[in-house]
Image: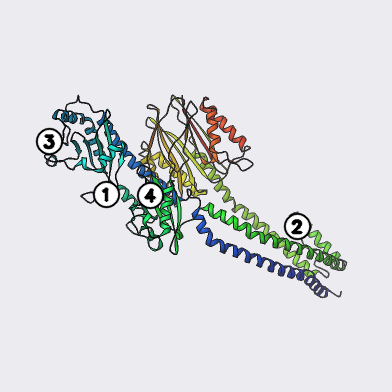
Amino acid sequence: MAGIDGLREKLLVVLVAFALLPMVILGIISLVEMNQASMDVQSNIISLSTSLNRSALAVGQGDADQVQLAIAKARQYDEFFRRFASENELVASYATAGSANESCTPSGIWVAPIGSNQTTPERRDATIISLCAPARIMQELHKAKSSMFLSYIGTEDGVLAVWPYSNKTLSNTAPFGYKDMPYYYQARQKKKTIWTAPYVDGKGNYAITVATPFFRGDEFAGIAGMDVSLYPIYSDLSSMRGRGYPFIMDASGLIIYQPEIKPEGGLNEIFEADNIFESTSSEVRALGRGISKESSGSILVGLGNSDGYVAFSRIDTLGWVLCIAYPAEEMSLPARFIDSGIRDVAKSATAGLNDASRRVQDYVLIIFVLTVFSVLGAAWWLGRRIDDQVASFIGAAEKISRGEFDVQANTSGELAGLAVSFNKMAESLKGYVAGLEGDAVLRGGSGKEMAFLEGVKRNLVPANVPQEEGYDIQTLYWPSEMNSFDLYDITRAGDKIAFAMAGVGGDGVQAAMLAIMSRTLIHASSDKLDPAKAISDLNSQINQHGHGTNLACFYALLDPVNHTFEYVNAGFNPPFIVDPGGMVDTLGGGGIALGMLDRMELEKTLIPIQPGDVMVMYSNGVVELENGLKKQFGIERLINLVINNRDLPASEILKIAKKALMEYSDEKHGSSDITLIILQRS
């Protein structure tokens, strides 16, 4: 070889022949195989796009947010009617036990004219006196209920106590012929509280009547009744604009409430007939049958050229069903359905890619072996000519490997041009390493963020837990290494003890700020002694400042004097109580987390705490803690642990629970914070 120019040409030819050509062949083969696999993936996903939307809506009826909204609303309305029925039954019970010893003439009394019945004046006078107590209770209940149009007690003796009343109306005739009302005979015949169908009264108001019979001895004595306005229910449903189209169906299929603004397109078929069972659409009639069979869920219904999605839940007190209809194309599919569908597609689609990959590997192995032998032969032929220059490069490379970048390869000889390039490379590596060191300093910001989040978790834990004579309160908090947040707080609120537990939806700095904000707002709330008001106000603040985040929250007040526990629950795990006999009672609640709805009407519940009761409040991290087999600890395991150790002090129960959690997870923290509170009455 005469010089560097001749060597460069030979190297170029050899490298092109033995390196570039095999890569070109491999690229062509890979392109053909991968292109075919890509076409298979595309075909599978296209076929999925038409079926996944429909199948995902047709399963998992209890999991969708829309179904949970229907259940929450139905429970709210059921409680509304149940309270009226309970209060009406209270009046009837006082009418049953009416005392003839009290001398009074209740306001709003009307007596049928003489001759209109066979009752003696003496008996009617006794009846009037016996209505003193129930009439006063009826009047007080009426004053406290803005939704009540009319309250009354009508007896078989022809005596009617009504509120509100008009002296002018009552002087000669009754306000209405109560004995002629169908519900009077129905209540008498069924011997229990009944509800009428909705109706429009003389003033154009939508109302419904509840009637409860009362007996004296074995003899039917009369009924207690209330005319209840349906305006709060209809007004609440009308406010759900933008969240589907709500309607109410009774047991016969009659639509007793439908949206004022009808939906456009195929969804309007649901409301074309007053009775769903009489619709001209077979799909709508099938929808009615499906709704009447289940207590809650969702149904996908075909409507013309489109689909509809109906979430529903039963209003048990009246036997009505609250339904919310949505156009299927506007639905957000539950994430777990999409995940399941994508997994199925991935399995079928990647099967082709795996086959192609194996074929490519076989081709690569063959080409690699051929290339290795070819390159070894070429290297042996050329190596004898460039040994000295390579030795220089090796020495310089060894220094670079030790971090010494101030090196210079020998620039004389046939490979002088290559040596110059090598020296330039060494200078570039020196600058690159310096850049990496600078980047490492800059990346230290992520460590600051982690330190900030860890500090937030530490500060969210109360420094001291208040104790009360006769009660033992024990807590356990294990922060996870993830950015999720649990928070709990136990403080005094007047002469009571306030408990707050919450799980923040989301992670990172935004979740930390929501946790800090929520704990601060609960502490600063002027309504701490009213759980429903305090948490409703917190929901408003989260909607205003939470930027799309949500908070599952449980808030309660322990009254150590009266031994009661008053609470509200917004989407948090329902606590449970184990009594001294080992019976388990789960607190009601759950529902929707704060930040999900613009306005929330939370119902507070008051329960007694008996001697020996053990109450357990827990976060998701407790029951979702996994062992090495990815099996969760579970609520049943936690309940059994408390049952088996209920006679021990709360501190011992907590130690046993802590040990069980550590052994179950092999002392590894889970992906969520673990928070556990045990309240025990001695």
Few, some or many residues within 10 Å of mark 2 (<14, 14–19, 20+): some
Is 485 situated left or right of 595 in this image?
right
**Residue at the spot of label 2:** 400
**Which numbered mark, 2 or 3, is in the foreground of this view?**
3
Q: At 12% across and 37% down in the image, what residue appears?
A: 113
- Residue 652 visible? The answer is yes
User: Is tag 4's residue or tag 1's residue first in the polypeptide sequence?
Assistant: 1
- Rendering quarter of residue 427: bottom right
Callout 1: SS: strand
Q: CA distance from mark 2 to mark 3?
A: 122 Å
Q: At 43% across and 63% down in the image, what residue appears?
A: 304
The residue type indicated by label 2 comes to: Ile
**Which numbered mark, 2 or 4, is in the foreground of this view?**
4
Does residue 39 sit above or below 476 in this rendering?
A: below
The residue type indicated by label 4 comes to: Leu
Give the number of the disc on residue 322. 4
**Residue at the spot of label 3:** 115
Q: CA distance from mark 1 to mark 2?
A: 92 Å
Give the number of the disc on residue 199. 1
- Residue 595 visible? The answer is no
The residue type indicated by label 3 comes to: Gly
Q: Position of residue 301 (x, y in %)?
A: 45, 57
User: Is tag 2's residue or tag 3's residue first in the polypeptide sequence?
Assistant: 3
**Along the viewing direction, whichever of 582 and 461 lies nearer the viewer:** 582
Is 132 situated left or right of 507 in this image?
left
Callout 2: SS: helix
Callout 4: SS: strand
Q: Position of residue 283 (x, y in %)?
A: 43, 58
**Along the viewing direction, whichever of 171 and 558 lies nearer the viewer:** 171
Is 478 situated left or right of 513 in this image?
right
